[in-house]
Amino acid sequence: MAEKNNFLPLMLDLSGRKIIIFGGGSVGERKAELFSGCADTLVFSLEFSQRLQELEASGQVRLFRVDLLAASDSELRKLISGAFIVIPATSSFELNRKITLVARESDILINQVDALGSVVIPSVIKRGDLVIGISTLGHSPAVSKYTRRQIEGLITPAYSDMIRLQDELRTYLKQYVAEQRKRKELLWKVLENEAVWNGFSESYEKAEERAYAIISDCLENSGK
Ligand SMILES: C[C@@]1(CC(=O)O)c2cc3[nH]c(cc4nc(cc5[nH]c(cc(n2)[C@H]1CCC(=O)O)[C@@](C)(CC(=O)O)[C@@H]5CCC(=O)O)C(CC(=O)O)=C4CCC(=O)O)c(CCC(=O)O)c3CC(=O)O
Ligand SMILES: NC(=O)C1=CN([C@@H]2O[C@H](COP(=O)(O)OP(=O)(O)OC[C@H]3O[C@@H](n4cnc5c(N)ncnc54)[C@H](O)[C@@H]3O)[C@@H](O)[C@H]2O)C=CC1
């Protein structure tokens, strides 16, 4: 059984990784939606939701019709070979358990949808380059979803602009300020400056101008 306090919200590069989902219903569909944008996503099931069929038609997932109850352990092992994560999401608890055991023997990560597996899928907020994952470690997925909606309301478009500006300033400062501690101090002066944040509502250039003014004032004063 997974130990709850050993989980970490890591950001993984899933390019080229194989994600295998068993069950093409509402849960399998939601998982396929999430993974199809960044990994090779395969779904094995008796039936497939309308949305999964659309995802297949647009080449975002691969669907394989199969009665998994009839599959032996060695056939299941073949189906999951090379998978990075296996997601048993059929409507049969027993079948999900059987797939879980085979995946565990093959030392493959498992996202269990009817218990706490070795991988827990968080609620995800993606706003440009800002990515936030939220989990209650299985206690209440509804609270994860609720928290996602609360935080989404706080993330204005200015956050993406500030990420772009901080990225630009970091490159600029690395050329002119040798000391990392000083660069960090300057970046935070810009990050915590209300006038820069307000500048984005006028234009990116307005905020950028204010940011460079802050930096040159600081550098002049520290040079004195
Ligand atoms: C353990 C986990 C395993 C996993 O699936 O990864 C799990 C398990 C279960 N979920 C259940 C139910 C619901 N799950 C949701 C929604 C989400 N579930 C997600 C993750 C997780 N769900 C993992 C823990 C996440 C964490 O740590 O918080 C999210 C965050 C990510 C995703 O999967 O996409 C996604 C929100 C995405 C978003 O919109 O932000 C809703 C809400 C809704 O759909 O409106 C409901 C109905 C309300 C309720 O019942 O809570 C049930 C009971 C089924 C039953 O009663 O039979 C189980 C099984 C059980 O716990 O027994
Ligand atoms: N993690 C989560 O967020 C949630 C998890 N659940 C759990 O997830 C499970 C799946 O839920 P839903 O997707 O709503 O069920 P569903 O009934 O919508 O889909 C089940 C899928 O499993 C397939 N299936 C069933 N028996 C099969 C077999 N022998 N061979 C191949 N495919 C088979 C069906 O064809 C169908 O596509 C439920 O049992 C429930 O315990 C339910 C709600 C939310």
Image (spheres, rainbow, N blue to C red):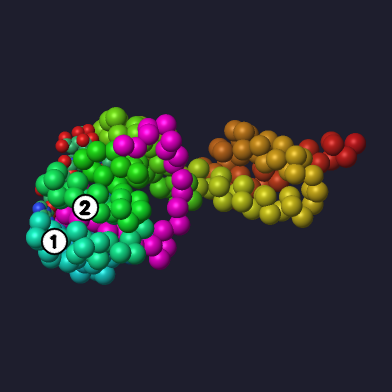
Whole-percent x, y for residue 168 in the image: 64, 53
Disc 2: CA contacts within 10 A as few (<14), some (14-19) or many (>=20): many
At a point 66% along the width and 37% down the height, the residue shown is 188
Asked whether mark 1 and ligand 2 are closer than 8 Å, the reply comes as yes
- 69 w.r.t. 123: above or below: below
**Is residue 66 among what the camera can see?**
yes
Which residue is under mark 2? Answer: 99
- In this view, which residue lies farthest toward the right? 224
- Report the front residue among 155 and 102: 102
Q: Secondary structure at mark 2?
A: helix
Which region shows up in magenta?
1-29
Q: Secondary structure at mark 1?
A: loop
At a point 90% along the width and 36% down the height, the residue shown is 224
Which residue is under mark 1? Answer: 71
| Label 2 or label 1, whichever comes before in sequence order | 1
At a point 74% along the width and 52% down the height, the residue shown is 174
- 23 w.r.t. 181: above or below: below
**163 horizontally vs 93: left or right:** right
**186 horizontally vs 103: left or right:** right
Whole-percent x, y for residue 93 in the image: 14, 44
**183 horizontally vs 204: left or right:** right
**Is residue 215 among what the camera can see?**
no
Q: Quadrant of residue 18?
A: bottom left
Amino acid carrying label 2: it is: Ile
**27 horizontally vs 120: left or right:** left
Q: Quadrant of residue 148?
A: top left
